[in-house]
Image (cartoon, coloured by chain):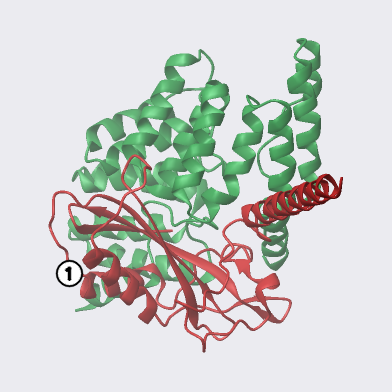
Chain colours: A green, B red
Amino acid sequence: MMRFIFFFAILLFTSKVIAQPSCYAFMHYGDTLKYKACIKAEEIDAYYQFSKKFQEILDASLSIDSTFAHAYREKSVAYLKSGDFLIWKKLIDKAVRFNPKDNLGYRGWCRYQFFRDYKGAIEDIEELDSLISYDLGYSANGDYHLNIAKALCYKAIGEKGEAIKIIEKTLGNKDYSVGIYDYLHLGVLYLETRNYEKAKQALEQQMIQNDIAENQFYLALVFKHQRKEIPYIEHLNNAKELYVKGQKMFDPYTNPMDKIYLDDIETELIKAIN
Amino acid sequence: MGNRKNMKRRIGIILAVLFIGCHTKKVESVEQKYLRWVGDIEQDIAIDRKDFKLCNGDEKVIQYFNTAQGFRYKGEKTKLFKTFQKNFIATHEESQNGLIRIRFIVNCKGETGRFRILESDFNYAKFHFKDNIKNQLLEITKKLDGWELLKIKNQVNDYYQYLIFKIEKGQLIEILP
């Protein structure tokens, strides 16, 4: 676990997560300006994405070709992670303007993850869907397919039926690889819409896929509604045990939707015992 | 002849001053454009508490996520959110909608300082919230005392933290990250 944290910390300090486009592809298609801008942008690999040098290299890249979307997107990341929504949005909008297919899904995900801009995220993901005939792809952190992210946004604006429909459809696709929190979110949606049997099935499925404190906690709530006291308390205890061990929802930048905290479990345990 | 010489010298001095002036201005603008890291907050003696000290200097302040432990506050986000719920008085004004970010530094003792505010409407355009809303959020943020210490290899670091408040009709709807 410590090794994992150390590795992750190094990653957060040093890397740029966005894949650099192949510069030779620009050359191949005869866009020498973009090729040169791209070669220049490759120099950022040696620098931290918050650093002055990193930003200056990308400025130089953009001075070669001011339509090089990748450079705007790379520049935007430090502003995103420091919560500077004003500069981030200006930069990422340019990336989208010059290359919508590669950047709409990313912008949509960031709007959701960092700013809880649910309607904006839905617009971006749906616009991308209208532009392409291939799969939408995944969130920048890899935790969600963009269809699931879209469903979470629908839930957040109160359209829980639509959210359930999207997740069920996505999970029903035979080619789909299940995400680490998909069944958890589906289970919580069923719970919130009082469909307790389906909630139980989804949360038990989450337990098989990726057993974390959250699925145990929400499963406890299902049993609470079904007035089954023994499994209610049992799953709360399981939730606490997993939480303390660190088996819970996690993102280094923001707190994911449906995440629970130790206080939530302990408060519920007090209610269960009394 | 003497006048012409004087004139040439004057023009030379003027051009030199202009050149130096322009050059200095250019260097300054580059320096101002980027600091060490995006989002670095320099001390401003006009607004920052003088007794707030960094333990490792401005050059070593990290970001809250650099240790890969996520958002860290004693009692977690539940406690933080409850603190704002308890102390923030909503204004219920139709015109007050958007995001407010308060960014600051947590030093190696868990003390906070150098608070800065950024505001936008829900279209990411500049917006100025009413002072009553901003001041309340700022004062509550300044009083938060549960910030965890961030260690890397036994060194306790100073770090940048931010809170983003989502405001709808003068009410506090969500807190990020």
**Neighbourhood count class around disc 1 (C-alpha, 10 Å): few under 14, some 14–19, many 20 upward:** some
Q: In which quarter of the image is residue B32?
A: bottom right
Q: Is residue B24 left or right of residue B169?
A: right
Mark 1 falls within which chain? B
Residue B96 lies, in percent from the top left, at 21, 52
The image shows residue A22, relative to residue B39, as above or below, that is above
Q: In which quarter of the image is residue A158?
A: top left
Q: Is residue B121 left or right of residue A147?
A: left
Residue beneath label 1, please? B89
Q: Quadrant of residue B64?
A: bottom right
- Give A62 or B63, whichever is nearer the viewer: A62
Residue A215 lies, in percent from the top left, at 39, 54
What is the secondary structure assignment of the residue under circle 1?
Answer: loop
Answer whether residue B8 is visible to the viewer in this image.
Answer: yes
Residue B43 lies, in percent from the top left, at 56, 74
The image shows residue B23, relative to residue A67, as above or below, that is below
**Residue at the extreme front:** B1
- Residue sitting at x 38%, y 42%: B124
The image shows residue A204, relative to residue A179, as above or below, that is below
Q: Is residue A79 left or right of residue B152?
A: left
Residue B83 lies, in percent from the top left, at 29, 75
Q: What residue type is labelled 1?
A: Ile
